[in-house]
Structures are given as structure tokens and as C-alpha cells.
Amino acid sequence: MNSNPLFSSYRSLAARCTADARTPFSDAPTAAVAVLRDGAWIPGVRVESASYSLTLPALLNAHTTAVALGRADDIVALALSRPARPEEEAYVEQLSSGPFRFDPDDVWHLSEASVDDLPTPEEACDPHLDRALSSPTDGLAAARRIARRAHVPASAYPVGVIFETANGALVPGVNVEHPDWTRILCAERNALGTLQSYGLGTARRGYLACLDDPEGTPCGACRQWLAELAPESDLWMERGNDDPECASVSTLLPGSFRGRALLDS
Ligand code: THU
């Protein structure tokens, strides 16, 4: 066990990322990293929801961030901060950017890549959009362009989103589908998961583009996440030929369950 120093460097990197996990309910922070061909890496932390089953697992968070950044095909290894669980092995086994081989050192690496060719991890991959947004229309146009990165073999329904924090950080999200539908992640939760993994703070504003649906709005699961992680946020949505609509999170999900009582136990 732990014989390969490169693999143990991947796992240590993941262990350092646990500081950004959001685990108020379990108090058991977990993190993962997706290591890219060029040595850049993408963190993914566990993000718990008061609706427990909406919890975003660390590995899924790292992978879906890679998709939103247009880097999924560059993933050569995945590692966790703790020993892998059977459901995590099943999740990675079915990723379309694989196949990945699970190593006894608790690291997955691309089957076609020789272990000797795997990179030493360097800098974290920059998740930010490469430019500022000048208006809501500009934000929605940028979200449309991001939506082209969506991985949607099951639905053919690409969604793109951009969230902006109080500090002006802008990060993208897309929906990422998986053969196991319970592991499908919406664009909104993808972007909020990325903000959490990179410790970028709370979203204040979002821009949502459902490419083929002028009536597109966030699903109930994403509304729950917004209520928990970005309660002060506004969300801009396209409305076809009409003007875009802006809704506050409190309007999208009035009377939401935040799970405060669960924290006292
Ligand atoms: N989807 C989103 O990305 N955001 C939403 O708020 C609604 C649904 C995705 C999930 C799935 O990939 C596809 O759209 C069809 O539901």
C-alpha cells in the first residue's frame, strides 16, 4: 500500500482540499482531485445538503467541474482524500472519458496511460471565466456558449450557467449526465460545487441558459441547493424572444428547508 510516491502525492493533494468541503451535517470532510495530462489539477469537495440525498460527492464534484471547464478529456488520474468506496469505483467505471484502472494505491488512472507517463501535479486549473460580463444579456450569452460543453447523451438538453460571487469571481457550470441517472448533475449545482471546491465564496448572481428551452428554469433540487448555498442570489433566465427574467432565490423556493435543526444534534 502507498508504494507509488506519485499516487501518494495525488492523495495528499486531495487531503489538503478537504479544508474547503462543506460538511455541516456529517462533519466528515472528503475531497478528490482530477489530475490533467499537463499536471494541472481540479479539486472537488463533498458538499452536503440538508436534503441529504442531494449531497454532492467529492469525486463527482471534481469530474463535473472538469467537464464544465472543457477539460474532461484531459483527465489522466483521479484520487480521493480517503480510501475509495464501492459506489465510487462504480461511478468512475462508467465515466465516458475513461476507461480508468483502479490501482490498489487508491488512485484511478487512464487505462491507456502508462503509470510512468503520469504527471507530477503542478498548479490547480483556473476555473474562472476569462472575461468580465457587461450586462445580464452578456451573462446569458456567455452561459449559452458554456452550455456547449454539457455532457448530455441521455437528454440532449444542454444547460449552461455562470455564477458570480460578491468578489466578482465568475465560474461556469454545465449539466453532466451519467449512465446511472442518480449521478446526473445539473448545471447550477455543478457551478455551485465548483465555487465551494475552490473556496470562492457565495454566489450573488447567476445566468442560466437552457439552449433548447425558452421556458427553462432550475429544477427543484437546484432550487434547494440555491436556498442552502446561495440564499441571497438572483438568477437571470432567458425567455426566448421576451426580455430575460430575474428571480431571487427566495422567490424560486419560498419557505425552504435549510436543516438548521439538524446542526444541533
Ligand atoms: N438540468 C439542469 O442542468 N438544470 C436544471 O435546473 C434542470 C435540468 C439538466 C439535468 C439533465 O441533464 C437534463 O437537464 C434533463 O433534465
Image (cartoon, rainbow, N blue to C red):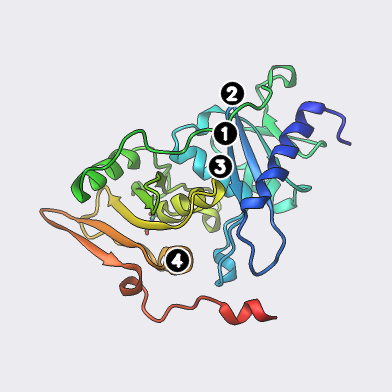
- Distance between mark 2 and mark 3 Cα atoms: 14 Å
Badge 1 or badge 4: first in the primary sequence: 1
Can you give x and y, in whole percent of width and height, for residue 188 in the image? 41, 55
Q: Mark 4 points at which residue?
A: 221
Query: What number is the disc on residue 63?
Result: 3
Q: How crowded is mark 3: few (under 14 residues within 10 Å), some or many (20 or more)?
A: many
- Distance between mark 4 and mark 2 Cα atoms: 33 Å
The amino acid sitting under disc 2 is Arg
The amino acid sitting under disc 4 is Ala
The amino acid sitting under disc 1 is Ala
Badge 3 or badge 1: first in the primary sequence: 3
Badge 4 or badge 3: first in the primary sequence: 3
- Distance between mark 1 and mark 4 Cα atoms: 29 Å
Element at label 4: helix
Instruction: Mark 1 and mark 4 in contact? Answer it, CB < 8 Å.
Output: no
Can you give x and y, in whole percent of width and height, for residue 130 in the image? 36, 33
- Distance between mark 3 and mark 1 Cα atoms: 14 Å
Element at label 1: loop
Disc 4 residue lies near ligand 1 with CB under 8 A:
yes
The amino acid sitting under disc 3 is His
Q: Name the residue under label 1.
A: 124
Can you give x and y, in whole percent of width and height, for residue 241 in the image? 10, 53
Badge 2 or badge 3: first in the primary sequence: 2
